[in-house]
Every structure is written in C-alpha cells, then in structure tokens.
Amino acid sequence: MINRVDDLPVIRQCELLDLCRSSIYYRPVPLSAKDMQLMRQIDEIHLAYPFYGSRKICNELWARGHDVGRDRVRRLMRRMGIEALYVKPRLSASHPGHVKYPYLLRGLAITQANQVWSADITYIPMAKGFCYLVAVMDWASRMVLSWRLSNTLDSAFCVDALEEAITRYGCPEIFNTDQGSQFTAEAFTESLRSRNIAISMDGKGRWMDNVFIERLWKSVKYEDIYLKAYGSMAEVKKGLAAYFPFYNERRWHQSFDRKTPAMVYFGTLPQKQAAA
C-alpha cells in the first residue's frame, strides 16, 4: 500500500511494489451525464439485440438522435463489460496470466439440479452512476442460487456469490463460466478446485451457452431495474432482494410448462442431496 506521508519517496515505493508511478497520481475523471445516458441506451440496445457490435449499436444510437462516434461507443461498452454475442474466438476479456480450463458440457444431457451451475456478470444502470451484478444459476432449473453487487469488475464479489451458493445449496458437479478474468482468477478457481468441482469454461463456438443467463438479465432489467430507476447501490440491493425470490418462487417459467425455477430445482434435486 502506498503511503504518501512516509519518509520513503512515493517513486521508490512504486518501484518496490512494481507499480506504475503514473497510476498513483492519476485521479479518475467522473463520467459525464451524457455518457451515463448513452450507457443506459447501449444497455437497452444490447438486451434487445445481443448480437449487435459497436458499429450497429452506434447506428442504432444515431437513429435515436444521439450524435456519437463508434470509438466512444466501443469505450463505453468496454467500461460496461459487454460485447456482441456471436461465434468468435474469445467471448470475453481474459487475463493472459490466468489458467484456462476446457469446456466440459459438449454433448452432456443436463437434466437435474446441482449437475451444472453457471455464473455471469451484467451492468446495472442507476440514476447516478452504475454497478455490476453477478449471479450464480443452476443450469437445469434456471434458479438463481446467489448474487452480489459491486462497483468494480474484480473477482471478490464473484467469489462471495460462489461461496454463498455452495453454503446454501451444496456443491455442483460442474461449474461453467466464460473466460472472463473474474472467473479465471486464482481466488475463484481455487474455491472450486478445493471442493473437487469440475471447472468448465466456454470456448470457441460456445456462444449459445450464454443465452440462458442473458435471458435472466433481460428479465431482471425489464421487470425490475428499468421500472424502478434505482438511485443508489443500496436501493438496487434492496430491490433485487425482493425480485429474485419472486423470480425463483412465483414467476412461471415458459420453458418448464408453467413451473417456477424453484419447483424444477427441488423437483430434480438428487435424492441424496434433497435428504441432506
């Protein structure tokens, strides 16, 4: 940790910690109201057309009356952590120093609870600012097992969500994510390896694996976030604490013949785990 009042010069502290000196003196510039408005619009366009890249999103913004260039759209999309959903070599920004894991779901019939879990992160707009939401979902039932909010895209809040899900529902056989740096981080993968949970990561041609949780994000935003227009992370947290029980236990899921995710989860839970 840099101590600005220590006798050791800040330059020397940066050298010892292998930090870039310019990053210590940099003060982040807050986003303008215009950028916040554009990010909200980009989020809505991405939900409606998840296959749109920065070029088509830029065109859609122009159609809505926003005079904005593609470079600006691309920069805001990176800040939001979103990108087009289509077949490509890489699905998300990975860390070059992190271990990559093979994809384990090819040809696998996923028919029961706790067989496969997955996790993903989405951008949440607020009246003033934004935050990020991670959710852990049971693949077979689409039940949301845990979730966390954060104002930064690090791995800590993802680990917290994972630990809560395991504490409440036990361990899955396989945990599947994309190759985002939050999920390839040692802290996250170690939580899985230490419990002998098989780690699966999406690879080339596996873009469809994101569809289930993308549908969750669409439901969350159109049925709660956009309607409520929360002003702070505290308000978002309170709102989602009410929404996710509704989603799991009261919202009929069309894919399950008018059953809720909770009905499917507990109805397909292996007998041994259900007894525990």
Image (cartoon, rainbow, N blue to C red):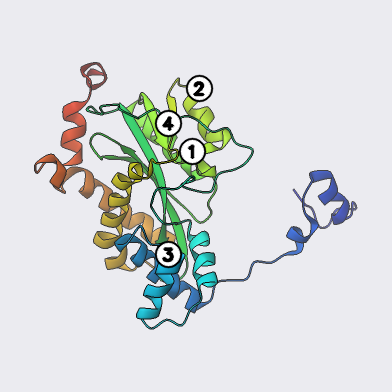
Reading the chain from its start, which is encountered first: label 3 or label 1? 1
Reading the chain from its start, which is encountered first: label 3 or label 2? 2
CA separation, marks 4 and 1?
A: 21 Å
- Dividing the picture into quadrants, the one containing residue 58 is bottom left
Residue that label 2 marks: 194
Q: Is residue 142 above or below residue 37?
A: above
Residue for point 42% across, 81% down: 66
Q: Residue furthest left?
A: 257
Is disc 2 in contact with disc 1, using a CB cutoff of under 8 Å? no
Q: Is residue 173 above or below residue 54?
A: above
Residue that label 4 marks: 103
- Dividing the picture into quadrants, the one containing residue 56 is bottom left
Reading the chain from its start, which is encountered first: label 2 or label 4? 4
Q: Report the amino acid beneath label 2.
A: Ser
Mark 1, other Cα within 10 Å: few <14 / some 14–19 / many ≥20: many
CA separation, marks 2 and 4?
A: 19 Å
- Residue 159: image tag: 1
Q: Is residue 254 above or below residue 276?
A: below
Q: Where is residue 33 drawn, in percent x and y? A: 49, 78
Nearer to us in this view, 273 or 198: 198
CA separation, marks 3 and 4?
A: 37 Å
From the viewer's perspective, is the residue at label 3 or at label 1 nearer? 1
Nearer to us in this view, 153 or 274: 153
